[in-house]
Image: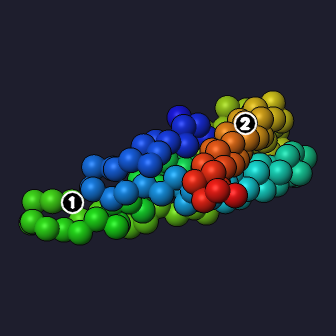
Amino acid sequence: MDGTSDIGAFGIGGRRGSGQVVDPLALAERRLHWLDRRQSVLAQNIANADTPGYRPRDLTPFQRELAGQMRLAMARTQPGHDAGNAASRLNARAERDAAEVAPDGNAVSLDREAMRVAETDTAHQLAMAVHRSFMGMFRATLGK
């Protein structure tokens, strides 16, 4: 999976295996930031569709990046427990598995990029809906 679906991968408002409470607003905001960066990377891919030798880029999937950061936050309490790995980078990485490569070396597929843009837009709408929903609940609780 490319990491653009399921904003509640760690249970909205619940607890993850490490006992940490997941803040749904913070998670939605992090997701929105990641989606914004991904949209920029995809726009660069489309802009370079005719650039000789250009390889399309994409971000590390959100779930993998988030899981890597969650592992870093855990404390090592016993020698046999996993202390976590280096943080997954959110930087764009060149794709290695480009199915189509033009004779000039360009590997951008406009169809594939259009699908990714649509997936990112749908995920953005979902994250915004979650954010608005929780903000509405907070306002209702506060009587505003």
Q: Residue at x 21, y 59 (%)?
A: 82
| Picture quarter with the C terminus | bottom right
SS category of the residue bearing label 2: helix
> Outermost residue toward the left?
79
Residue 2, image quadrant = top right
Around disc 1, counting alpha carbons within 10 Å, would you say few (fewer than 14), some (14 to 19), or many (20 or more)? Answer: few
Q: Position of residue 91 (x, y in %)?
A: 61, 63
Vertical placement of residue 21 versus 97, above or below: below
Q: Residue furthest front?
A: 143
- Residue 31 at x, y = what percent? 61, 53
Residue 36 is drawn in which quadrant? bottom right
Work out whether residue 133 can be spotted: yes
Q: Pointer 2: residues within 10 angstroms few (<14), some, or many (20+)?
A: some
The residue under the point 42% across, 62% down is: 69
Q: Nearer the viewer, residue 126 or 75?
A: 126
> CA–CA distance between discs 1 and 2?
35 Å
SS at circle 1: loop
Question: Which residue is denoted by mark 2 in the rendering?
Answer: 122
The image position of residue 45, as x and y in percent, is 80, 49
Q: Is residue 122 left or right of residue 93?
A: right
Q: How many numbered dots are placed on residues in this image?
A: 2
For image coordinates 42% across by 43% down, the residue present is 11
Sooner in the amino-acid sequence: mark 1 or mark 2: 1
Amino acid beneath label 1: Asp
- Which residue, given by chain and number where applicable, does mark 1 sit on? 82
Q: Identify which residue is drawn at 34% across, 50% down.
A: 15
Relative to 9, residue 70 above or below: below
Question: What colour scheme governs how the chains and residues are painted in the rendered image of this protein?
Answer: rainbow
Of badges 1 and 2, the one in the foreground is 2
Task: Provide residue 95's location: percent of width, then percent of height.
Answer: 63, 47
In front here: 88 or 99? 88
Amino acid on which the number 2 mark rests in the picture: Thr
